[in-house]
Amino acid sequence: MTFNALVVDKTDDGITQVIETHTDAQLPEGNVTVNVEYSTLNYKDGLCLTGNGGLVRTYPHVPGIDYAGTVEASDHERYQPGDKVVLTGWRVGETRWGGYAQKTRIDGDLLVPLPDGLTTRDAMSVGTAGMAAMLAVLALEDHGVTPDKGEVLVTGASGGVGSIATAILSNLGYEVAGVRGLADTPGYIESMGASRVIPLEDLSETTKRPLETETWAGCVDAVGGDMLARVLGQMNYGASVAAVGLAGGAQLPATVIPFLLRGVNLLGIDSVMQPFENRVRAWERIAKDLPLEKLNNMIQCANLNDLPTLGKDILNGQVKGRMLIDVNS
């Protein structure tokens, strides 16, 4: 049988994006064949769709850094036909065939069984951003952060990672302070569960003081840069920051003083190469602790035909919320 795939290619005229009809013979190597149902659009996808950033090394290529679907055939001991599965990370969509196709084939070790309580649509409504957010929350928990310890800060609280982290933390009983961006919709961060909103300008400027008043029991930071440096000096003694993004830059103009005098922990969160056991733990907690109804207002739906335009839009900051890609519509 044939299926559709969005293929990115490099030609003399530049990067092209064309929906092509493929057969199973064109699928990549692997021991599990998956009928893809949903994927998403992330910033990395925009880079791969447009040929920017050097993420795609070999053309022609099928992008899409995550997907969820149903197993069609399997030679892997963990999966049987009919099983629901989800994939994020492992450089899928960059160096491996991605989710912008109605069918794919992959090494089953890279897949995760979809936990009870989640549909494939739910999984991609969350996607890579939700996986990263949940890993950040788990890291804070593993380092002793509990709701009774005090207020938890979420930077970039209107973005994909920040929104989902706010919703999870609030649902777990934390008091959450979300940092508002310049173009944020009024009331949005509160709708995700934040008990108060911090103006961007309160944290965007650096300070010469390495330590400020102890304010936060924990932090999920999706911004990095100057804001992360500022937040480190405001953490409670022994508190932890889970660093999961760099929207504000990759540089960290900070000192070691918060680490030495307050025992602050800076926890790096990687969602690409996480071991299987950590992925299973994260997805099971997403199914249990993320109130999916809070995401309804941030989800937009699109299909394969929309992706060439959306890839450019997301790089220009013109895509808000979560973009769900129905590859079969």
Image (cartoon, helix red, strand yellow):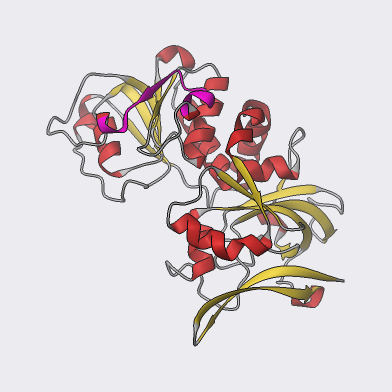
Q: Residue at x 50, y 68 (%)?
A: 50
**Furthest-bottom residue in this view:** 12
- Is residue 192 found inside the magenta-colored segment of the image? yes
Question: Is the residue 64 above or below the residue 192 in the image?
Answer: below
- Is residue 308 found inside the magenta-colored segment of the image? no
Asked if residue 73 lies left or right of residue 20, the reply is: right
Viewer-side residue, 320 vs 82: 320
Question: Is the residue 125 above or below the residue 101 in the image?
Answer: above
Figure quadrant of the C terminus:
bottom right
Viewer-side residue, 279 vs 297: 297
Q: Quadrant of residue 184?
A: top left
Q: Position of residue 282 (x, y in %)?
A: 60, 37
Instruction: Report whether residue 93 is seen.
Output: no
Q: Position of residue 189 (x, y in %)?
A: 47, 28
Asked if residue 78 lies left or right of residue 236, the reply is: right
Q: Residue at x 50, y 74 (%)?
A: 57
Q: Residue at x 35, y 38 (%)?
A: 182
Q: Residue at x 77, y 34 (%)?
A: 116
Q: Position of residue 327 (x, y in %)?
A: 72, 58
Which residues are drawn in magenta?
Answer: 189-201
Figure quadrant of the N terminus:
bottom right
Viewer-side residue, 306 vs 129: 306
Viewer-side residue, 137 vs 295: 295
How many circles with numbers are drawn on the protein? 0
Q: Quadrant of residue 210?
A: top left
